[in-house]
């Protein structure tokens, strides 16, 4: 991790910075929903501590990762899913994305999880390479799952063990 970057749990005071970052990193390369509205909140009441981790540099939020239980089922409690990752373009290439993923996996492991999963669009090659570097492998593909900007793209399911 770069010396000037810290990773910590998100707090309510991070909401504005997280919302601004989410809008700044939004792209059809990684998203299937429209760009968030300027007044949209990032942190929601249903989030619990440890679900959103932030990367902070010089007092500013420069990245985030959100890891949650994919379902509310007791039989699925041992799995967590990454449902959002963003790094400020101004600080990309410094390993912050990998550090956030590693921190999310460590947090999930500390909560008793055995597996981490995620979904990534097939055409998002940079994200897929990042996830592979972090130990994720392709576990399934849903062909033509989304129609984005006039083109069909697959939804790629990836996962890794945490132990």
Image: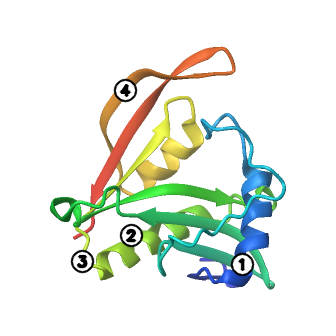
| Residue 139 appears in the picture as rendered | yes
Q: Between label 4 and label 2, give the one nearer the viewer.
A: 4
- Whether residue 91 appears in this view of the structure is no
Query: Which mark is on residue 113?
Result: none
**x, y (%) of residue 106?**
38, 76
Q: Which residue is drawn at 45% across and 51% down?
A: 131
Colour mapping: rainbow
As measured in the structure, the alpha-carbon distance from the residue carrying label 2 to the one carrying label 1 is 21 Å
Residue 115 in the image: state x and y as whole percent: 26, 61
**Disc 3 to disc 4, how far (Cα)?**
29 Å
Per the image, the residue denoted by label 4 is 142
- Mark 2 lies on residue: 105
On residue 14, which mark appears? 1
Q: Earlier in the sequence, mark 3 or mark 4?
A: 3
* Crowd rating for badge 1 (residues with CA inside 10 Å; few <14, some 14–19, many 20+): some
Return the x and y of residue 18 as percentages of the image width and height. 72, 67
Q: Quadrant of residue 119?
A: top left
Q: Earlier in the sequence, mark 2 or mark 1?
A: 1
- Residue in the image at 80% along x and 53% along y: 24
* Label 1 – label 4 distance at C-alpha: 34 Å
Q: Choose between 136 and 18: the one closer to the eye.
A: 18
Is 112 above or below relative to 83? below
Tag 2, which secondary structure? helix
Q: Is mark 4 on a helix, strand or loop?
A: strand
Q: Is residue 95 above or below residue 154?
A: below
Q: In this view, does 109 lie to the left or right of 26?
A: left
Would you say the residues marked 2 and 1 are in contact, meaning their CB atoms lie under 8 Å apart? no
Counting residues from the start of the chain, the first of labels 4 and 2 encountered is 2
Alpha carbon of mark 4 to alpha carbon of mark 2: how far?
A: 24 Å
Asked if marks 1 and 4 touch (Cβ < 8 Å), the reply is no
Label 1 to label 3: alpha-carbon separation:
26 Å
According to the image, label 3 marks what residue? 112
């Amino acid at each position: 991790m770069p010396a000037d970057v810290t990773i910590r749990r998100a707090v309510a005071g991070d909401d504005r910075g997280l919302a601004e970052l989410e809008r700044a990193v939004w792209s059809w390369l990684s998203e299937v929903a429209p760009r968030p509205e300027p007044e949209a909140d990032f942190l929601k009441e249903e989030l619990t501590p440890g679900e959103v981790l932030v990367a902070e540099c010089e007092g500013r939020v420069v990245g985030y990762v959100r890891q949650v239980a994919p379902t509310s089922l007791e039989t699925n409690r041992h799995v967590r899913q990454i449902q959002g990752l963003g790094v400020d373009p101004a600080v990309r290439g410094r390993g912050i994305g990998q550090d956030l993923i590693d921190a999310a996996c460590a947090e999930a492991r500390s909560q008793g999880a055995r597996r981490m999963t995620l979904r990534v669009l097939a055409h998002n090659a940079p994200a897929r390479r990042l996830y592979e570097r972090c130990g994720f492998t392709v576990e399934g593909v849903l062909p033509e799952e989304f129609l984005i900007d006039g083109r069909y793209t697959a939804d790629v399911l990836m996962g890794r063990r945490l132990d």
